[in-house]
Amino acid sequence: MSVGTLSPAYAGDGQVDGKGGGTRTDQPPAGSGTGTGSGPDSGADSGAGSIGAHIRINRKTTGSAASTSKATSSNADWKPPVCWYEPMYTPDEYEDFIDSSYKGAREPAASYAKKRADEDYHKGDEGLWWQVQFRNDDYTDACPVTPANWEIWVPPAQPKADPDQLTPEILSELAYNSTRLPKPPVVLSPTPDRLKVNLGTRVKLDGDFDRVWTTADIDYKGVEMAATTVATPVALRVDAGTSDADPQTCTYDLVKGDNGYTVDSKDAACNVTYLHSSGTGTYPFKASITWKVTWTDSADPDGPARQPGLPDGLSTYEQNVTVKEIQAVNR
């Protein structure tokens, strides 16, 4: 989505924005839902939530890994949508909304209400009024929708969709942003408090660790669409947490087994070996799972993957480890 420079507005604010004759404030437009105000937090562990006005979020985690965290994108430049248009009103409902929300409004909001009245709210036409909705209440990221068009009219046979109108692609990005990934259930051998100098560290994943998916869908006033993002674990990267290790990092491909994806570095060509004791302190050992993320334009996680693709996801486990010298006994 393109990035503009406008903040949200509402009907009673009298500050002129200067880009389209709208108004500015720290609140969304009247009648608009937001990601944090219209339903449960979509990032909660409940597995379900809502965002915008009518978008539902449902998450599915397979396997037994219990600890999860919000997915981190491997692409630092990737950002989820800030706002989008969602179906909201029939013509009659829109007239009621304008009459109640803009009653007694000052300029330029009064002119906005008059413009809609002059259009007769498209009464008698087939279609719906779609309204701008926001992912959350953090307006530091600009919404590209101008206050001159907080709502747009969308007929059934729309010749050209607005670039910010809700689509399965936008739903897939919202689903990605709501995805929670299991933290790597890493088991070290020897245990983290008993690692030894010059002894290879064996790494395993404990439990049935498998793919996860998140569906974002809308079914409102005849508008139905859905998108499902599917995150599949593909690689484990471990970092010794010190340059006094050979090698300092190792990466292992994950293998699909009967009980999910796993790795066992026992016979791997790459195993972290600490060269020096951690002394009286510890080393910050870190393990990260890379997740290949795809999306489908339905609620079916096994549907065909669509384009454009989404960036890989990351989930991380951190553990302070103690490394000791191996004590030899001389006789």
Image: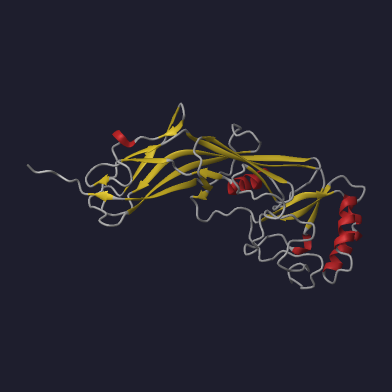
Work out whether residue 230 or residue 66 is closer to the camera in this orientation and state it: 66
Image quadrant of residue 108? Answer: bottom right
Q: Is residue 12 left or right of residue 183?
A: right
Point 30% across, 35% down: residue: 266
| Residue 323 rendering spot, x and y as whole percentages | 27, 49
Point 42% across, 34% down: residue: 262
Quadrant holding the N terminus: bottom right
Image quadrant of residue 202? Answer: top left
| Residue 251 rendering spot, x and y as whole percentages | 36, 42
Looking at this view, name the residue that lies furthest to the bottom: 15
Work out whether residue 299 or residue 276 is closer to the camera in this orientation and state it: 276
Point 22% across, 50% down: residue: 275
**What colour scheme does the image use?**
secondary structure
Instruction: Tell how many labels.
Output: 0
Work out whether residue 225 or residue 268 is closer to the camera in this orientation and state it: 268
Q: Is residue 161 above or below residue 256?
A: below
Q: Is residue 267 above or below residue 249?
A: above
Image quadrant of residue 218? Answer: top right
Quadrant holding the C terminus: top left
Q: Is residue 98 left or right of residue 324?
A: right
Q: Is residue 136 left or right of residue 30?
A: left
Q: Is residue 35 above or below residue 172?
A: below
| Residue 270 rendering spot, x and y as whole percentages | 29, 40
Looking at this view, name the residue that lies furthest to the left: 331
Work out whether residue 43 or residue 229 is closer to the camera in this orientation and state it: 43
| Residue 252 rendering spot, x and y as whole percentages | 37, 39
Looking at this view, name the residue that lies furthest to the front: 331
Q: Is residue 252 left or right of residue 83?
A: left
